[in-house]
Amino acid sequence: MTVARIEKINGSPAIVVNGRVYPPMTMTVRRAEPDPDYMKRLGEAGMKIFYIPCSSEWIDSDGPVPEESPALEDFSRKADALLRDVPDAWIMLRLTVEPTPEWCEKHPDHVISYQDGSTKEVITHSKQSVYRGMYCIASDLWRKEAAVTLERMMTKLDNSPYADRIIGYFLASGGTNEWYNPCVLTDFQNGLYGDCSPAFRAYFSTFLRQKYGSDEALQKAWNSPNVTLDSPTVPPLEKRKHIYADDVILDALLHYEDASRMVGKSIDNDPHSATHHGVFLNPDTAQDCADYFNAFHTGVAESIIHLAKVVRKHYGKTRLVGAFYGSYGCTEYYDTGTAEAVVPIINSGAVDFLAAPGNYDNREPGGYVSQREMQDSFRLHDMMFIVEEDARTCHSEVFYRDSMEQFSVEDSVNTLKREFGRNICQDMQAWWFDMALKGEYWYDDPVILQLFRRQQEIGEYAYSIPRDKGSEIACIYDQESIHYTSCLTNRQMLDFFRTSDMNRIGTGMDYYYHNDILHPDMPDYKMYLVINAFAMTEEERAAMREKFARNGAVVVFLYAAGLIKPDAEGSRIGVEHMADLIGMKIRMFEGTRSPRYKLRQDLPEVLSLAEPDKVYGVPDRVVRSNVWLGNSSTAPFMNPGFFIDDESATVLGRYGLGGEAAIAMKKQPEGWTSIYSAPQYLRSELIAGFARYAGCHLFTHTDDCVYANRNFLTIHGNRTGKRTLYFPVSCRPYEVYEKKFYGKDVKEIEIFIRRGETKMFSLAGEEF
């Protein structure tokens, strides 16, 4: 019997099938009937695990069980073709489990609805069917019938000729099969809000009962004497204003000059009410809003867990189970329902991996593809994060070729080297996703296929040696803070910042959800970069301080770190909570302020890589979408804004307006050093300087994209010219594609690299 598991191989998780280890990359071909010769060439290039999309026949609990199985026939045709072309292929089944449009018509209480009972038609793109409204994924009835449908499909597949070639179930549902809700829940334009369906109201009640336990606790948290666990209210639009507060601020900033000359135009650059303070929800008056969206996201996660347990019960631990979930980029942070509950999935023990495509910004040569999840939390729990690597090439459609600057095979090869180097250095699995539906296949090129063959060799070698990454920097993200914060602020700090600067500091780093601070196996780091820890309980704060003090780390906090303390006895929002976490006295600006600041001119050691005359605090890199027309942008404002007012702190920079301290550092009594950046944004050279001050090794700092671990260094050129690479110990750097050593027992080398060129060095001193 086939046995496929995630096992720890040389210190880190890997896919193991019947005792054989499969490093990245794997393969998905979108076309329903791929060209046999292309599939053979992929198999010859070393691709052995293929994802095959498959639908399931929905089974209504009160309806007949269908005898015929068109979905199984469709899968059989695809599996026959794959195994004919690649006889030793393994199949990951990308199985869509979603109801029919007729089911939604028959069960209107289980369809997302608004406060007036109305619904909005949607297309999920999996069956290309129009639904009267999006089915409620948190619905008990949906889960029950989805489980029956899944169980029936697994039984049929067990009796098919392909039973022993199927190694796992990649569960799919919702928008584009990625579990998100494609139906807007917060519609200010039309005065609508949801989800008010009976199905979600019932789930919301269950969620709150688990969180609060009693009506009294709920009433205290919501500051509402009449609310009960049996009948919680859905927060109206008034309590959701913080979600799009940036739109109001930007409108004021863009039209302040001519608003008085526009009939009917009024502007407000300080959106502030009882329910929100600028871009932050006020938990003293609108905690129900944060709880509601937490429940909406958790409901989706619990449905994934529910179906994963069905697979586990059926197969035990002989098949892999995964799903899309956990998007910190590209999708919306509130209505889509797939951001705030990754940790419950990780902790469930039912799921082997989660997956997501990389973000769709700055993918062109000279840029890099940032990820949507915190991959090292998965590694810590012996799970995997798998990247859907839909890298466009010179053979993609015309728009993609142009927008991603894939003008030649050489451009494509260097891009594919960059993505593969990231997966090896950051220790992630991935599948190449050839999305071509017609015309040329994206990867059907002899040069690209030869590259794939070499990458299989590199991957096998990488998995054969100790895989401890040895990173010295950890980035800490907080899920619970997402729904206390506006959409644009989330995007700026969780998406654009990671996309523009995080991989340009010249060394590797690890990514965690803050919950893992308490995990006994989480390594200690020399530096922590705390990105969005806006809402932290007392227990979480204490755990952080204990972790930071363990080895006297340097800790960098951004923007409103600690602003909200959900379990505070008095007001739950205030600068005193920030001071409690950051270890400095903080004050707040009222209204909208500019985040621009300049550094002190003497540039102390901690600012050793900074530019003395540069204005910092605002995003100054172009974040260009490679899928949608136009440029992405981040907001050059703060509302609220903050500054340091602490005589015992060392000021590193001051605002241009007013001269208040914008960035400072302070040694803490427990031995760790706090650096606080009041603006939301840090340039890579500042982070690199902080890292050098903390004693972290930098391989280079030339603004290139760099991925690194103990064994490998990948550099992708941001511009053409010479670079010096520095190694932590003497080594024999071996360029894995040239199969060439760049010296013996060297601690630094000089290379020439072109814009968009990728070089990947093995540092273990072996030739392979």
Image: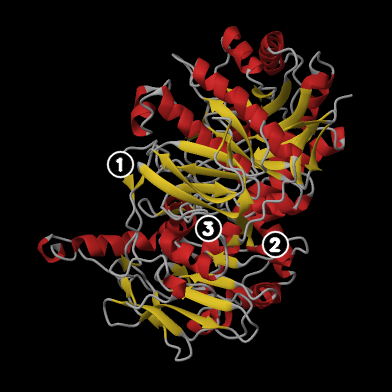
Determine the secondary structure under disc 3: loop
Q: Is residue 198 visible?
A: no
Q: CA distance from mark 1 to mark 3?
A: 34 Å
What residue is disc 2 on?
A: 516
- What residue lies at 45% left-to-right and 89% top-to-bottom? 646
Please state the horizontal and vertical placement of residue 142, each as a whole percent of the image.
69, 39
What residue is disc 1 on?
A: 630
Contact between labelled residues 2 and 1, with CB atoms less than 8 Å apart: no
Contact between labelled residues 2 and 3, with CB atoms less than 8 Å apart: no
Q: CA distance from mark 1 to mark 2?
A: 37 Å
Determine the secondary structure under disc 2: helix
Q: Is 249 drawn above or below residue 73 in the view shown? A: below
Q: Which mark is residue 252?
A: none
- What residue lies at 67% left-to-right and 10% top-to-bottom? 85
Between discs 3 and 2, the one toward the N terminus: 2
Inspect the image, locate mark 1, and give the three-letter code of the amino acid beneath it.
Gly
Q: Is 277 drawn above or below residue 44 in the view shown? A: below
Q: Nearer the viewer, mark 1 or mark 3?
A: 3
* Quadrant in which the N terminus appears: top right
Please state the horizontal and vertical placement of residue 688, each as a whole percent of the image.
47, 62
- What residue lies at 37% left-to-right and 71% top-to-bottom? 639
Q: Spot the residue most to the left.
A: 261
What residue is disc 3 on?
A: 698
Which quadrant of the structure image shows residue 157? top right
Q: Spot the residue most to the right.
A: 1
Inspect the image, locate mark 2, and give the three-letter code of the amino acid beneath it.
Asp
Q: Is 413 drawn above or below residue 352 in the view shown? A: above
Please state the horizontal and vertical placement of residue 110, each as a whole percent of the image.
62, 42
Q: Nearer the viewer, mark 3 or mark 2?
A: 3
Pick the residue in front: 166 or 123: 166
Q: Is 607 drawn above or below residue 353 in the view shown? A: below
Between discs 1 and 3, the one toward the N terminus: 1
